[in-house]
Amino acid sequence: MKVTVRFFGLFKRYIGEGERVFDLPEGSSAGDLLRLIGEEYGQRLPADLWDTDPGRFYRTVRVSRKGGPFLDETEPLNDGNELLLLFTMAGG
């Protein structure tokens, strides 16, 4: 399944792009997406966003559906979702 992720604020600055389409296995969750983003971009992110050991974002990093509330990491994603990756301390 394909989901579109829009990066804002600090993420856009560090990642170097405003949007990307990710291809995930069916049944993937918001947590699966976060892990994939971290694996691909973690080396570009500062230590206060991405914890290299154990390889996960801090709680201030959240995913939401466009126009919706923040998702729990166990929340399933659907093909075609438009998602936002936000750093909540920056007003997200």
Image (cartoon, rainbow, N blue to C red):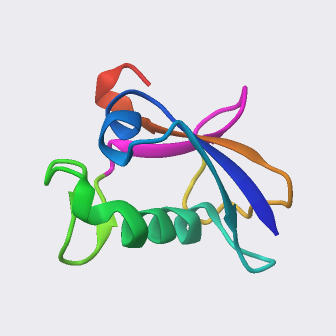
Q: Is residue 79 left or right of residue 46?
A: right
Which residue reaches farthest top?
A: 91
At 86% from the left and 60% from the top, the residue drawn is 79
Decide: is 42 above or below 68: below
Determine the image quadrant of residue 43: bottom left
Q: Is residue 75 left or right of residue 61?
A: right
Residue 13, horizontal then vertical, whole percent: 33, 34
- Residue drawn at the location 70% of the way across and 31% of the way down: 68
- Residue 16 in percent (x, y) is at 39, 42
Q: Quadrant of the N terminus?
A: bottom right
Placement of 19 over or under 10, stated as above or below: below
- Counting every numbered tag in the picture gives 0
**Residues in magenta, as a range:** 59-70
Q: Which residue corresponds to the image point at 29% horizontal and 28% vertical from the top-left? A: 89
State which quadrant residue 39 falls in. Answer: bottom left
Q: Nearer the viewer, residue 22 or 79?
A: 22
Residue 28 shown in magenta: no
The front one of 19 and 53 is: 19
Judged from this view, the residue extending furthest toward the front is 16
Position of the C terminus, as image quadrant, is top left
Q: Up-down: is 48 above or below 65?
A: below
Q: Tell me the residue at 73%/64% (across/down).
A: 76
* Residue at the extreme left of the image, as rendered: 47
Q: Is residue 39 above or below residue 64?
A: below
Q: Position of residue 48 (x, y in %)?
A: 16, 48
* Image coordinates for residue 32, horizontal then vertical, percent: 56, 71
